[in-house]
Image (cartoon, rainbow, N blue to C red):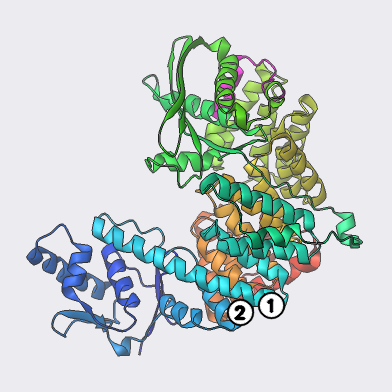
């Protein structure tokens, strides 16, 4: 008898109990299987399925489509065709002999328990939203999907709040923080979760962090609901005694300073549209957008959504800002003609679409930097009640750079954005030319450094030592030219962490970058991963969550860092689900997931995951290591700079047991 496992809480995945994948080719096929799984063994009426999946068709057409879908599903399941029972008139169900197990059914069984083990299992089963990534075209199907997502999320949140009570009763404050963090990623206004975080800080003698978290929560409630935290929440932090303690030697050696955002206004700069002109000038519109976002992000009182998320939001053609969590949006268009540039910009209140300010600028290229300052100044002036006045002149100060060099820099940054070999090498040539024109162009030196750091982490470099030296040298040159340029400090942090595996120097440089640019999502994300790799999972998670707030739609690197931290803390179930969530975009997540599964006692699944990782790298790496232990270790050390040799060797030993020759 062949059994099957359906994973539906997160990106849908179908496989045999032995771990062999089953590919369901259509969205409607996935929807039908999910509908049956939700029924938990009960048959589902054919007419109900037809109305759900083909609401725009006549009954006869819908039934014919259902018959064809059932034929397709039998082909998808291959030799194990006896999965769907369609012999009973008017209904569809699973054959008992098919032995279908779904995470939906397991979740419902575990969530009803009151003991910690059951609730932890229910908590770990959510790898994402129900059928995450599925986007039905049929409106009835889409509404059904949204309703079930909402219902399952509510049930998960309810079970997780009960788990938090158990954890607090057990005095497990670190686990309570981790669980509350996950809960807040699904329900950011869950007051009980915020109470758990505050209680945990107080219990661990971190009253200042408790106060900061309370203040952030209070401002979020005021901004979104116009209400105050309840009396219990206030009493937890305000009545907590001020305690003094002697820091441990490790804490004294490496102070962990997290600077939470306390924003008064959140804003996103959407990609400026290019009106006419040469399609080759797309980099100009993209570069102008990114620079405006960077300049606004230097204001500590503004929370600026990262450009990667703003781009994804715009590409999805969304007419709302809910995915970005932004109160205000800057929109605009740009047109280049001969030696002039025309820019239209507007500031919009996201909730109701009201335009607060709009203006057209018509300038020669030589005035481009002044034009950027004008736009930033107008936006900040409109939001003047939200921004400290003294910040204005501090931020709007840039050294003069010739337009030709700036244009080369914008082209290079556009090429290098995806960290691909061809783009990095093309960007390098452009940046060298920009620096030749303007030797004191600090941002160009910083961008050059980042390209060499990306090469050092790659599997295509032919001279790793040269890449390391150039990454360090270019970043140091950027800082020497302009010590106030956060890009230089971020580039040096990246180079020191990945190329030199120097955690302490990288941490110090990233923190300087955050002082200069409080919304530097890249430095936050780097610190999240660096802390996770070096034994500070809780601190890493805080930075990663801060980064996620600024980059809500492009989250995989931060989620990967959180999963790495969970792994090193021994939370293998959380780690496995976290790595599964990002495995589509981060190859190494498969290897970490294999190690997590091995530690959970799932040896066969661990070996399958590791084989999948090796198969992926075989198709991508220019020089695949095969069974060469030294080459695999060298590659992993470039992308996983773990300073603690014991921690590193323990991880590699688990990789080896799962099948990777390291």
Is 299 positioned to the left or the right of 153 in the image?
A: right
| Circles 2, 1 touching at the beta carbon (< 8 Å) | no
The N terminus: image quadrant = bottom left
Task: Tell which tag, 2 or 1, sits nearer the viewer.
Answer: 1
| SS under mark 2 | loop
Q: Which residue is mark 1?
A: 169
Q: Residue at x 40, y 58 (%)?
A: 133
Q: State how many labels appear.
A: 2
In the rendered image, the vertical position of residue 225 relative to residue 234, given as above or below:
above
Which of the 4 image quarters holds residue 392?
Answer: top right
Q: Residue at x 62, y 52 (%)?
A: 217
Q: Quadrant of residue 23?
A: bottom left
Image quadrant holding the C terminus, namely bottom right
359 or 556: nearer the eye?
A: 359
Q: Which residue corresponds to mark 2?
A: 600
Answer left or right for 640 relative to 125. Answer: right
Q: Estimate the x, y position of residue 369 in percent, counting from the top left.
A: 60, 17
Q: Which residues are magenta?
A: 394-412
Q: Classify mark 1: helix, strand or loop.
A: helix
Q: Position of residue 5 (x, y in %)?
A: 41, 78
Q: Quadrant of residue 334?
A: top left
Provide residue 418's location: percent of width, then percent of height. 53, 42
Camera-side residue of 480 and 420: 480
Q: CA distance from mark 2 to mark 1?
A: 26 Å
- Earlier along the polypeptide chain: callout 2 or callout 1? 1
> Label for residue 567?
none
- Is residue 566 part of the magenta span, yes or no? no
516 to 42, vertically: above or below: above
Q: Position of residue 322 (x, y in %)?
A: 45, 46
Residue 405 magenta-highlighted: yes
Which residue of the protein is positioned furthest toward the left in this rendering?
A: 60
Relative to 450, residue 32 above or below: below
């Amino acid at each position: 008898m062949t059994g099957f496992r359906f994973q539906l809480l997160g990106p849908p995945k179908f496989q045999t109990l032995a771990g062999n994948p089953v590919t369901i080719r259509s969205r409607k096929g996935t929807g039908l299987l999910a509908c049956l799984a939700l029924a938990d063994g009960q048959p589902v009426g054919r007419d109900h399925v037809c109305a759900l999946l083909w609401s725009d068709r006549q009954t006869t057409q819908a039934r014919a489509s259902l018959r064809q879908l059932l034929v397709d599903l039998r082909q998808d399941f291959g030799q194990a065709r006896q999965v769907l029972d369609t012999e009973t008139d008017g209904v569809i169900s699973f054959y008992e002999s098919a032995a279908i197990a779904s995470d939906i059914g397991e979740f419902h069984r575990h969530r009803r328990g009151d003991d910690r083990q059951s609730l932890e299992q229910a908590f770990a089963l959510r790898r994402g939203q129900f059928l995450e990534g599925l986007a039905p075209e049929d409106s009835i199907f889409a509404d059904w999907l949204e309703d079930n997502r909402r219902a399952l999320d509510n049930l998960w949140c309810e079970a997780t709040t009960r788990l938090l009570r158990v954890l607090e009763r057990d005095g497990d404050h670190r686990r309570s923080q981790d669980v509350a963090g996950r809960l807040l990623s699904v329900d950011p206004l869950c007051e009980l979760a915020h109470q758990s975080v505050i209680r945990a800080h107080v219990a661990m003698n971190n009253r200042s962090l408790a106060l900061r978290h309370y203040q952030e929560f209070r401002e979020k409630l005021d901004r979104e609901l116009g209400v105050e935290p309840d009396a219990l929440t206030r009493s937890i932090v305000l009545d907590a005694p001020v305690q003094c303690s002697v820091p441990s030697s490790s804490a004294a050696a490496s102070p962990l300073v997290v600077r939470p955002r306390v924003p008064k206004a959140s804003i996103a700069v959407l990609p400026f549209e290019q009106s006419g002109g040469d399609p080759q000038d797309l980099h100009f519109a993209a570069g102008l957008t990114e620079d405006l976002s960077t300049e606004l992000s230097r204001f500590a009182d503004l929370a600026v959504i990262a450009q990667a998320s703003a781009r994804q939001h715009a590409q999805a053609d969304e007419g709302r800002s809910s995915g970005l969590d932004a109160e205000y949006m800057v929109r605009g268009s740009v047109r280049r003609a001969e030696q002039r540039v025309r820019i239209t910009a507007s500031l919009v209140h996201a909730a109701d679409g009201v335009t607060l300010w709009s203006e057209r600028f018509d300038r020669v290229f030589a005035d481009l930097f002044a034009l950027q300052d004008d736009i930033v100044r107008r936006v900040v002036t409109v939001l003047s009640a939200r921004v400290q006045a003294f910040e204005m002149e501090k931020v709007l100060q840039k050294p003069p750079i010739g337009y030709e060099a700036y244009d080369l820099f914008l082209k290079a940054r556009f090429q290098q954005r995806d960290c691909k070999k061809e783009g990095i090498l093309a960007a390098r040539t452009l940046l060298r030319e920009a620096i030749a024109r303007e030797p004191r162009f600090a941002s160009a030196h910083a961008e050059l450094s980042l390209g060499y750091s990306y090469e050092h982490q790659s599997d295509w470099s032919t001279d790793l030592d040269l890449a390391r030296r150039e990454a360090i040298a270019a970043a140091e040159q950027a800082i020497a030219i302009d010590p106030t340029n956060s890009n230089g400090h971020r580039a040096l942090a990246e180079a020191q962490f990945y190329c030199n595996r120097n955690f302490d120097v990288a941490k110090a440089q990233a923190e300087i970058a955050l002082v200069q640019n409080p919304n530097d999502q890249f430095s936050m994300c780097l610190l999240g991963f660096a802390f996770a790799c070096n034994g500070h999972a809780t601190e890493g998670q805080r930075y990663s969550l801060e980064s996620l707030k600024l980059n809500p739609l492009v989250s995989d690197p931060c989620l990967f860092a959180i999963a790495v931290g969970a792994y090193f803390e021994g939370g293998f179930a959380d780690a496995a689900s976290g790595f599964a969530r990002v495995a589509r975009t981060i190859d190494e997540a498969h290897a970490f997931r294999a190690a997590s599964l091995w530690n959970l006692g799932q040896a066969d699944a661990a070996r399958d995951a590791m084989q999948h990782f090796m198969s992926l790298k075989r198709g991508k790496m220019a020089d695949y290591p095969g069974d060469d232990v030294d080459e695999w270790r060298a590659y992993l050390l470039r992308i996983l700079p773990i300073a603690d040799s014991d921690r590193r060797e323990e991880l590699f030993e688990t990789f080896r047991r799962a099948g990777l020759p390291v």
